[in-house]
Amino acid sequence: MNKQGNAYTFIYASVLVVVVAALLAFVSQGLKDRQLHNEEVAKMVDILRSINVEASSADAVDKYQKIVGESSYIVNFKGEKVDGVAFDVDLAEEVRKPIEDRNYPVYEAHLENGGVKYILQLRGTGLWGPIWGYISVNDDGNTVYGATFGHKGETPGLGAEIAKPAFQAEFPGKQIFEDGKLVSIAVVKGGAAKDAKHEVDAISGGTITSKGLQSMLGDFFKGYESFLKNIERESHE
């Protein structure tokens, strides 16, 4: 075959593309298990941070097993437990459903000196992409114990501040209900009122991200409302 001809060039390029694609597929498949493991560990780190437990990739699995272990489940809009594994729920898929049809993961954290905390998983939309988080609630089903948030692509120094400890530190002690009525937690531009039970300060310069986070909170607290009220009733029995 004439190596200077178009046919040779086309065949050579085609073979090269096939070989490279095969190699990439092989490498991707080989790394898949490790990637899934890393994603699971990152999720455990976030769950633990929502109960104010610091963890790293080195110790997250051990701490998660000790504090949460098998104490996780899925609830529906009515607050009833349903079949399935909480850790496997894909909220990116769930948020496409009507709020009444979603699966809501719950993680029970058993702290040595702090009793039981209920960790709720959230997902919403920021300025440039998805935002998410975990909020832990005391066994009164109302008072926030801790919170952690993450994002994909929010602006550094602005909306990305939702992932910083300074912002997340505003949530402990806030309340979700007022006299039994769901009021959620507002993210207030210009600053929350002093000693406000249902407000936190918005991110300076991150108006759209702040609104997205507030919407996420309201949306998922509504989804978890019946479950949280069940906790409150059980705490008084």
Image (spheres, grey):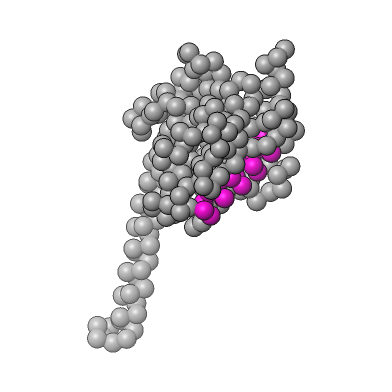
Horizontal and vertical percent position of residue 56: 36, 32
Span colored in magenta: 207-225
Q: Quadrant of residue 15?
A: bottom left
Q: Is residue 217 magenta?
A: yes
Image-based side of 75 in relation to 1, left or right: right
Above or below — where is 237 with respect to 166? above
- Image quarter where the N terminus lies is bottom left
Residue 194 % position (x, y): 54, 34
Quadrant, the C terminus: top right
Q: Is residue 173 magenta?
A: no
207 w.r.t. 220: above or below: below
Q: Position of residue 4 (x, y in %)?
A: 24, 86
Image point 64% across, 25% down: which residue?
Answer: 141
- For the stretch drawn in magenta, the main secondary structure is helix
- Direction from residue 215 to residue 28 in the image, left or right: left
Q: Position of residue 91 (x, y in %)?
A: 59, 44
Observer-nearest of 155 and 82: 155
* Residue at 35% in and 51% down: 27
Quarter of the image for residue 214 reads: top right
Residue at point 58% right, 33% down?
196
